[in-house]
Image (cartoon, helix red, strand yellow):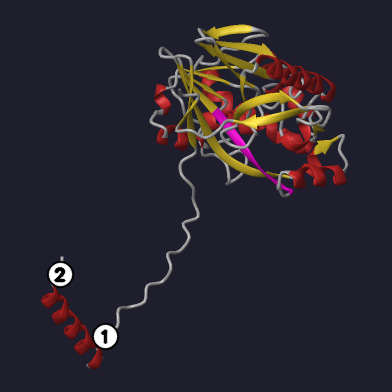
Amino acid sequence: MLIPRTFKRLSVLLAALALVGAPAMPARAAAPPVGTASPGFARMLLGDFEITALSDGSFALDAKMLLKNATPQRIDAALGTVFLPNPIPTSVNGYLVNTGTKLVLIDSGSGNLFGPTLGKLTDNLIAAGYKPEQVDEIYITHMHPDHVGGITTPDGKAVFPNAIVRADAREAAYWLSDAIAAKAPKDGQAFFAGAKKSMAPYVAAGHFKPFTGATDLVPGIRAISTIGHTPGHVTYIVASGGKRLVIWGDLVHVAALQFPDPNVTIAFDSNTAEATAERKKAFAEAAKTGDWVAAAHMAFPGIGHVVKAAKTGYTWIPANYAPVIGAK
């Protein structure tokens, strides 16, 4: 603490410096914007399991080009109510489940198959404290590039060298078929090529183990068939300690339109009638049970609940932020 005499001397010194033109302190420029966010992972406790939501990044989805059963005016109005632009910044999410005995990755992001704004899932897995070689199993909801592309490097090597990859046999039979790929529209053939390239090192190593329909994969994780978006689309149910997290994959893409009206479909669906039926069934079940739900294209971390709306349709309730979601 300055005593009065010291304070007086300091004042005299400062005044003298001002009179002789002491150099002014250099002006500091404002700090430039950094332009990046924190690593994209979020924790959740589910009974005895630890769930880590992993962001692969986001891409711009043009709702007017891709959504069906909705007029451009209706799309604009629905997005306006939640302050979203069109094209919509759309998340791509994967989920890492640590059961205590197995480390299971559900969907892998896009790798290099879906543009430069994606392909970040493995980096975020590492940022979350895990290593790719620790992953025991990988469960693919479907073989679109933004779900399967992250398992393989651009030069064709396995990103997760010790993992067994699992998907519905009907999904593999479709996307890995040269005959079906040859008949596909030209603008859709890249999807087949991406799936085949992504799966190749695991197929060659004997690490691809397909299943069909409802199957218990490891204790606490069950696959159920939800075909429609693709011929072998799967939902995964993770259960521990009386709690459930239902991982939907691509049953929903645009929350602002599809929760209020599950009849709204997207052009990526291989069978719109089947996809619509599965979405309605999933929404109704989630609203009834109160289970946690996770979806690949909901705003990161894509975890929340579904409730029945007052009149028609449903409402999405995203998880409240906490350092660990679900923690008491």
For residue 197, side relative to residue 12 (left or right)? right
Q: Which residue is mark 2?
A: 2
For residue 103, side relative to residue 292 (left or right)? left
**Residue 215 locus on image (x, y percent):** 61, 7
Q: Where, by quadrant of the figure, is residue 320 drawn?
A: top right
The earlier-in-sequence mark between 1 and 2 is 2
Instruction: Look at discs 1 and 2 and give the one toward the viewer.
Output: 2
Residue at x 46%, y 41% (from the top left corner): 39
Say if mark 1 contacts mark 2, CB within 8 Å: no
Could you say which is closer to the camera, residue 37 or residue 316?
Answer: 316
**Residue 122 locus on image (x, y percent):** 47, 34
Could you say which is closer to the camera, residue 48 or residue 212?
Answer: 48
Could you say which is closer to the camera, residue 188 or residue 145?
Answer: 145
Task: Name which residue type carries label 2.
Answer: Leu
Residue bounds of the magenta highlight? 86-94
**Residue 174 locus on image (x, y percent):** 72, 20
Q: Is residue 71 visible?
A: yes
Measured along the vertical axis of the image, is residue 180 above or below residue 36? Answer: above
Label 2 CA crowd tier, 10 Å (few <14, some 14–19, many 20+): few
Residue at x 51%, y 14% (from the top left corner): 206
Q: Which residue is mark 1?
A: 23
Give the Cα distance between marks 1 and 2. Answer: 25 Å
Quadrant of the rendering where the C terminus is positioned: top left
Measured along the vertical axis of the image, is residue 58 above or below residue 142? Answer: below
Q: Where, by quadrant of the figure, is residue 21 drawn?
A: bottom left
Quadrant of the rendering where the N terminus is positioned: bottom left
**Residue 72 locus on image (x, y percent):** 86, 45
Does 139 appear in magenta?
A: no
Is the magenta region chiefly helix, strand or loop?
A: strand
- Per the image, label 1 sits on a secondary structure element best described as loop
Say which mark, if any, is on residue 210.
none
